[in-house]
Image: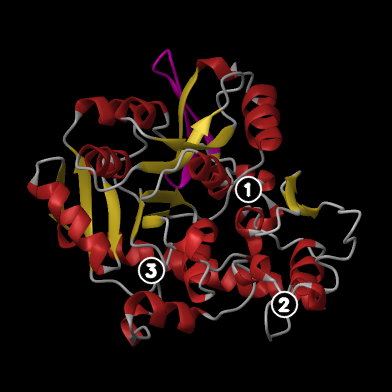
């Protein structure tokens, strides 16, 4: 991919048309002229009769803010490191980014544990922040009322709505799009929960001085992510079609070296990860960021059932988790009490970066 100033033309030609677009939707949200729409996962320019070349010829308005927040274009990782943390990463931080501390944590609330994916830390933190007035709302992944395993971006304000959104769906949800609803509802201080490609644009928005977007988000919680799968491939074709499982009987899907499908009956069915990867979104192969390197807090389940790995990156993130722990909302344990977890985190992050480099190199051939 070429370097230089991110422009609308580059975003369309080098990202959207080449198939590397992460489909996060942030470009649509920040567009000051409302000429970008989100259709079939991609930004589509609407046609304005009086200004048909509004974005195609960038000199017309000298805008390009959509490209400024694109996770596939500049600015560099180093620039985002300096913005977020005031420094570049050290040698030991090369694997998974700048951090203050890595801990293991879990919720102390049985209601959260009942619906959570691993340790319930994200839901517990958000519930605490809402109750304390730290945030006015949270941008999360909700579910489609008709098809439960299709995730939908959602702005929530209550603990009950958080519980309803608990757990993971391994199909993609463009969470930043819920910022449009949050703005209409005048929700001023927000927590954004999302995959790495959804949280890094917040820093890019701040670099570009897009205050309406960047400043509205008080804290970002990034989810550890190797890839997402297509709903049609994983859920409909593999789980429903090949395995003969009614999706209404599925209560949870998790990945621990293999895909685990939990049923209402208590049975757990397994899918080899290599088989599930046949349904991975191709866009995800270009992402080098496994561990949400520019979130305030990065969180996810690695290896240990019932616990969440929490990477505390910023001062704001560290203070938030410490305050929630002091309030008894979560239990925190040193990462050293879970041998091998830190090494596993580093291996995942390094493997993701290598995979993305190979994918991008193949694209240039």
Query: Helix, strand or loop at disc 1?
Result: helix
Residue 357, horizontal then vertical, whole percent: 63, 75
| Residue 48 located left or right of residue 148 | right
Q: Which residue is mark 3?
A: 346
Q: Secondary structure at mark 3?
A: helix
- The alpha-carbon separation of the residues under discs 1 and 2 comes to 20 Å
Q: Is residue 261 magenta?
A: yes
| Residue toward you, 307 or 89 | 89
Residue 257: x %, y % from top left:
45, 47
**Earlier residue among tags 3 and 1:** 1
Q: Is residue 93 magenta?
A: no
Please name which of the two marks, 1 or 2, marks the residue nearer to the observer: 2
Give residue 54's quadrant in the image: bottom right
Residue marked by disc 2: 361
Pick whichever of labels 1 and 2 is earlier in the sequence.
1
Name the side, left or right, on which 263 lies relative to 173. left
Give the Cα distance between marks 2 and 3: 23 Å
- Label 1 Cα crowd, 10 Å radius (few <14 / some 14-19 / many 20+): some
- Relative to residue 104, is residue 342 depicted above or below? below
Whether residue 301 is situated above or below residue 358 in the rendered picture:
above
Q: Which element is circle 2 on?
A: helix
Instruction: Classify residue 133 by image quadrant.
Output: top left
x then y, percent, for residue 172:
59, 44
Q: Which residues are magenta?
A: 255-271
Q: Residue drawn at (52%, 47%), measured in percent from left and top? A: 179
Q: Quadrant of the C terminus?
A: bottom right
Residue at position x 34%, y 49% from top? 303
Looking at the picture, how far across and down is residue 146, in whole percent? 61, 18
The answer to whether residue 289 is visible is: no
Q: Magenta part mainly helix, strand or loop? A: strand
From the viewer's side, name the closer residue of 281 and 33: 33
Residue labelled with disc 1: 277
């Amino acid at each position: 991919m070429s370097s230089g100033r991110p422009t609308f033309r580059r975003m369309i030609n080098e990202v959207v048309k080449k198939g590397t677009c992460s489909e996060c939707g942030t470009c649509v949200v920040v567009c000051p002229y409302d000429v970008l729409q989100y259709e079939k996962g991609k930004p589509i320019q609407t046609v304005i009769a009086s200004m048909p070349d509004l974005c195609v010829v960038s000199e017309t308005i000298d805008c390009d803010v959509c490209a400024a927040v694109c996770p596939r274009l500049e600015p560099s990782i180093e620039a985002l490191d300096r913005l977020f943390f005031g420094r570049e990463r050290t040698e030991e931080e090369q694997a998974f980014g700048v951090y203050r501390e890595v801990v293991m944590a879990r919720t102390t609330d049985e209601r959260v544990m009942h619906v959570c994916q691993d340790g319930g830390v994200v839901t517990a933190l958000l519930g605490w922040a809402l109750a304390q007035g730290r945030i006015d709302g949270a941008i999360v992944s909700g579910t489609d009322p008709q098809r439960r395993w299709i995730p939908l971006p959602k702005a929530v304000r209550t603990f009950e709505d958080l519980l309803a959104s608990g757990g993971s769906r391994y199909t993609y949800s463009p969470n930043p799009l819920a910022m449009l609803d949050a703005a209409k509802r005048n929700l001023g201080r927000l927590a954004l929960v999302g995959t790495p490609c959804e949280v890094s644009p917040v820093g890019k928005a701040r670099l570009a001085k897009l205050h309406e977007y960047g400043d509205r988000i008080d804290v970002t919680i990034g989810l550890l992510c190797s890839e997402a799968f297509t709903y049609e491939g994983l859920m409909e074709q593999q789980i429903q079609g090949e395995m003969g499982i009614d999706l209404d009987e599925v209560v949870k899907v998790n990945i621990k070296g293999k895909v685990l499908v939990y049923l209402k009956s208590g049975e757990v069915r397994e899918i080899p990860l290599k088989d599930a990867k046949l349904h991975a979104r191709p866009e995800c192969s270009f992402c080098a960021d496994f561990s949400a390197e520019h979130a305030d807090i990065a969180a996810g389940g690695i290896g240990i059932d019932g616990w969440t790995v929490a990477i505390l990156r910023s001062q704001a993130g560290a203070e938030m988790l410490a305050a929630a722990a002091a309030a008894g909302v979560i239990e925190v344990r040193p990462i050293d009490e879970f041998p091998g977890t830190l090494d596993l985190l580093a291996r995942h992050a390094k493997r993701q970066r290598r995979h993305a480099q190979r994918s991008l190199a193949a694209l240039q051939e």
